Image (cartoon, rainbow, N blue to C red):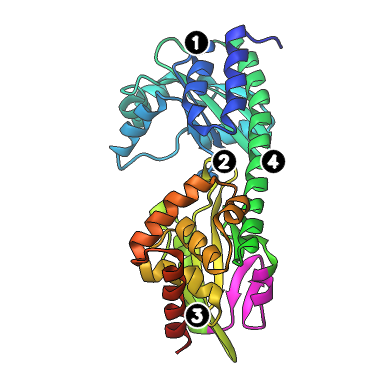
Amino acid sequence: MALSAATERALESCFDAIVAPDRWASALDNLAHSIGAHACLILPHEIADRQFGVVGSTEMAKMGEHERNQDWVTPVYEPRGDPFVRSGYQAVLQEQLFTDEEIRRSRFHQEVARPAGLHQWACGIFTAEGRYWCMPFFRSTDPFAPETLEPIAEIARRVSQVVSISVKVSQTSSANEVRTLEQIGCAAILIDRHGSVGRINRRAEDLFCCDFGVRNGKLWTSANASLVRLDRFMAELSSPKSTGPSLPAPVIIARAGSPWLLIEALPVASKSLEIFDGCLAILVVSDLTSSASADGSMLSLAYGLTGAEARLASAICGGHDLNAIAGYLGVSRETLRGQLKTVFAKTGARRQAELVARVANIRNVVRH
């Protein structure tokens, strides 16, 4: 069906937000306002999938604040809406899920939604990349009329294209990061939103053996103590709280007759593109007798370098100049120069030769 010019412009802004995620809130503000709503969300229907995939308009923050202040809040719309989702409905109204009396008695509606000014609800439903998604709209005035169902369904259909493209962009970007790490000598494994192994570069495959590898889509090791540590590491990585600086500490994996391995979790550099099909992290795996270990993960442990700083230091110690590293990592030379100053400050080195010497010292410690 034909949508209003304001709605069409807002949908164009949603497409722009695929590569500029800071525009999501304003794009959704405009989209909600274009149909007479105050706020809207895009989110997976399955609650367990919502560690990734949720974006909202500015006004949705009010709802979030009221929810955080209540320890009794449980999902309200999802249980009632699930039959409509499974039956192929493209849009539903609040009155199809609840009677007026149920809304009057509902703590959620009266103590969360109403104080936030978002107690009137209608929702678009769509599928994208094998999952059900919902796009609820909220306002505080009159209930949404039945004639709004058709435009909401059309908006949801258009947004399904946005989500599908976002997923593909995310997957491509993450795969490129794994390949880039291989170019600078790092064994890397991409961990998807389920905690399963996604992509593996060739350097990581070379470290797989009878004691360490992938089993049933998950990282596995034969050593019981190492498996306990690995399972704890992966559980912490999969926790919704495990983002950015809260990534788990590196873990050691023992291998019989082979050098032990160090596994370090690095944030996905393109995290801004990971909204709709997020990857938990990239794992860098290092043989503790190899120079790559000292040049990367061990540098992080020894000097507190970030993942980006450790990759830069590793590449420098591998004999690469800043121009080559900038090409590998897809960043400017000036960005690398700024990071290198921080590396020097943290390691105490004043020039690249001193940095290489410090790495050599760490190698000797690791080997002995």
Q: Which residue has dot 3 on it? A: 226
Mark 4 or mark 3, whichever is nearer to me: 3
- Eyeballing the image, is 329 above or below 35? below
Residue at the extreme bottom of the image, as rendered: 257
Q: CA distance from mark 2 to mark 3?
A: 33 Å
Element class at badge 1? loop
Among numbered discs 4 and 3, the one appearing first in the sequence: 4
Is mark 4 in CB contact (under 8 Å) with mark 2?
Answer: no
**Residue 231 horizontal side relative to residue 246, left or right:** right
Mark 4 or mark 2: name the one nearer the start of the chain: 4
- As drawn, 143 above or below 232: above
- The residue stretch that appears in magenta: 203-223
Q: Is residue 211 left or right of residue 114?
A: right
User: Between marks 1 and 4, how big is the CA–CA gap?
Assistant: 29 Å
Q: Residue at x 68, y 41 (%)?
A: 168
Q: Secondary structure at mark 3?
A: helix
Residues packed near mark 1 inside 10 Å, few (<14), some (14 to 19) or many (20 plus): some
Q: Secondary structure at mark 2?
A: helix
The residue at which mark 4 appears reads as 129
Instruction: Name which residue type carries label 2.
Output: Leu
Alpha-carbon span between mark 4 and mark 3: 35 Å
- Which residue corresponds to mark 2? 273
Instruction: Indicate which label's residue lies in the foreground, 2 or 3.
Output: 2
Question: Residue 184's image quarter?
Answer: bottom right
Q: As shown in the figure, which amino acid type bears the numbered disc 4?
A: Glu
Q: Nearer the viewer, residue 44 or 352?
A: 352
Outermost residue, left side: 69
Amino acid type at image mark 3: Ser
The residue pinned by badge 1 equals 36
Q: Are marks 1 and 4 in contact (CB under 8 Å)?
A: no
